[in-house]
Amino acid sequence: MKISREFIEKIPKTDLHLHLDGSLRLPTLVELAREQGVELPAWDEAGLRRLVFKNAYADLPEYLKGFAYTTAVMQTPEALERVGYELAVDNQAEGVRYIEVRFAPQLHQNARMTSIGVMAALDRGLALAKSEFNARSEVQGGDEPPFDYGIIACAMRMFGKGFSAYFDSLLDVHAHSERKWVFALASQELVRAAVEARDRLGLPIVGFDLAGAEAGYPAGDHAQAYALAHKNFLKKTVHAGEAYGPESIFQAITDLHADRLGHAVYLFDPHMIKSPDIRDKKAYVANLVQFIADRRITIEVCLTSNLQTIPAIRNLSQHSFRHMRKAKLSATFCTDNRTVSQTTVTDEILKAVQAFHITPKELKNFVIYGFKRSFFPGTYFKKREYVHQIIEYYEKIEKQFS
């Protein structure tokens, strides 16, 4: 069977690495900016794509510029609810049946909203889209699997003045403290808020993440926050190996108890190891890869954004996914940022199929990994039941295209 775009659109899919503030509809961005008095460099979609949300970027700092505009327009409950709703609907339209939306609530926390209020606003939008989709006759009749979602709270490895009202006030209150201590404090505070939102309000807060610049801001600084998440049964993912080497990935797994890894692009690069204590760098990488494989730690692969932010990757055939595949690692394809990277889950899978000549059998495994290794908000038994539904539906689509 040939894997076509039409087939990929039809099969049930996941997106486990999906940033809310990188995935707004551009018309919504413009409308919210006008409502809230936020200045944009352009006021039409074409202009924004030319100046901010491009096909290609010079480097990671240029890639990140757009987030200043998107977070600026998501400072009210109504805006967060709308963006969440539209994001779910856009995913549903291309056959994505499960998403984990990650964002940093503290970037949206202000005098009008606590971090829990921020998470609740996003949940209202996602829940509305879920209820509408699952009310369809084909879902109600059991012919198709339902749509579901989880929310991942992101802590920041670092922040400075101007990041958000919350971070500004925190830096003012602790003006004489060491910055990395303040960063760690903010992470711990977010874990407590996420656990309270889950346990008291029943929100589907399924995981905790750490995002931001790796170089100079080691994951180990946030070990206490992750220990707190670990003790409260909050699942864990970490941005690691996106801009730093295997040591960052090792630290994410051992010090932060990571269940999944975001990107892990430099997992197979011994030359990226900086520590003088690691003498046999190739052996270190081999042991690390084996450790990840043994524990089925899943890698959230984001091909397009990696191509856009890592100049060393000149084309997709050079992406380290080729090594992940050879090592039989658990991996799943994700968008990272649908708007900033101008991509969809369908686009990501199609690019992978074309660049790495993935077989139908392999594709099925990678897609199902997404469901199996998700931080599904229900019980283990409900998750198993859901995965079985997905597999049955996937196989039904396979037969249609065989």
Image (tube, rainbow, N blue to C red):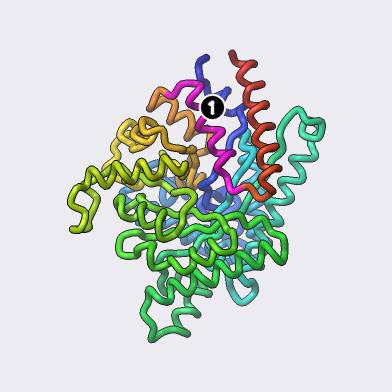
Q: Quadrant of residue 292?
A: top left
Looking at the rendered structure, the kind of residue marked 1 is Lys
Q: Position of residue 32 (x, y in %)?
A: 61, 59
Considering depth in this image, is 202 or 115 the residue closer to the camera?
202
Callout 1: 10 Å neighbours few (<14), some, many (20+)?
A: some
| Residue 339 visible in the picture | no
Q: Quadrant of residue 194?
A: bottom right
For the point 55% across and 42% down, the residue is 373
Count up the numbered dots. Answer: 1
Q: Quadrant of residue 123?
A: bottom right
- The quarter of the rendered structure image containing the C terminus is top right
Direction from residue 355 to residue 391 in the image, left or right: right
Q: Is residue 370 above or below residue 10?
A: below
Considering depth in this image, is 195 or 227 the residue closer to the camera?
227
For the point 58% across and 70% down, the residue is 192
Q: Is residue 344 above or below residue 215?
A: above
Considering depth in this image, is 361 or 337 the residue closer to the camera?
361
Q: Is residue 145 magenta?
A: no
Q: Position of residue 197 (x, y in %)?
A: 66, 65
| Residue 35 visible in the picture | yes
For the point 69% across and 54% down, the residue is 125
Mark 1 — residue? 364
Q: Position of residue 2 (x, y in %)?
A: 50, 16
Direction from residue 236 to residue 314 in the image, left or right: left
Q: Position of residue 155 (x, y in %)?
A: 49, 64
Q: Is residue 348 above or below residue 255?
A: above
* Range covered by the magenta-colored residues: 358-375
For the point 41% across and 32% down, the residue is 328
Q: Is residue 360 magenta?
A: yes
Judging from the image, what secondary structure is the residue with disc 1 in? helix
Considering depth in this image, is 336 or 248 the residue closer to the camera?
248
Direction from residue 310 to residue 212 in the image, left or right: right
